[in-house]
Amino acid sequence: MTNANQFPFAFNADKMRDMFKMPELDKMFEQMQVPNFDMDAMVKAQQKNIQALVEANQAAMSGYQEIYRRQTALVEKQMAKAKDQISDLQSQPMSAEGSSKNLEDLKSTLDQLSSDLQEMSEMAQKANTQALDIVRTRFEEGLQEFKAAADKAAR
């Protein structure tokens, strides 16, 4: 007879946690014995791959953070400049000279904006290139490791 106070589908947190435990790669593959295959080298290569991806993401994030800081500084600078220009416009009477000066200010602002956008583009390209270089380097190392393993297995 079962205890009426006990829920028939009791939840056991320990059993649930054990179900979702991640296996350790090196121990999981110990049971698999493949002739002429270095499982340790494969596990180390995968660890290197993951490390390279982490480094690439860190490089990209660092570059993107720098872009964000620069954009923030530029917006603050441009907002202060716009405020000053609006103040100047409000204090000047409408005249041909004033209009000419305003057009020159506008041209200068647009030139600066173009320069700032070019700078942002170069910063983004640099961040992406650094991240890609890390991944490319690891890929090339992985190819060399694979060739060395294949040569070793062929002997």
Image: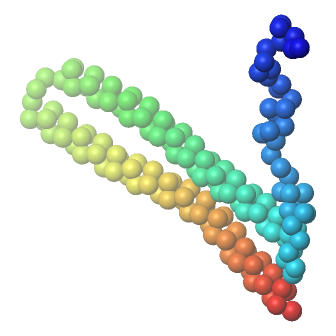
Foreground of the two, 29 or 137: 29
- Write down the quadrant of residue 148 in the picture: bottom right
The quadrant of the image that shows the C terminus is: bottom right
Say left or right for 78 vs 17: left
In the current view of this chain or complex, which residue is farthest to the bottom? 155
Q: Nearer the viewer, residue 71 or 94?
A: 71
Residue 140: % across, % down: 68, 75
Q: Does residue 47 appear in this view?
A: yes
Q: Is residue 154 above or below residue 26?
A: below
Q: Residue at x 75, y 79 (%)?
A: 146
Tell me the quarter of the picture where residue 32 sits: bottom right
Quadrant into which the N terminus falls: top right
Where's residue 54, x and y in %? Answer: 70, 53
Q: Relative to 154, is 67 above or below?
A: above
Which residue is at 47% across, 57% downward?
122
Residue drawn 81% across and 41% down? Answer: 21
- Left or right for 117, reference 42: left
Rendering coords of residue 81 (x, y %) = 36, 32
Q: Nearer the viewer, residue 142 or 66?
A: 142
Q: Could you tell me which residue is drawn at 54 percent across and 39 percent down? A: 69
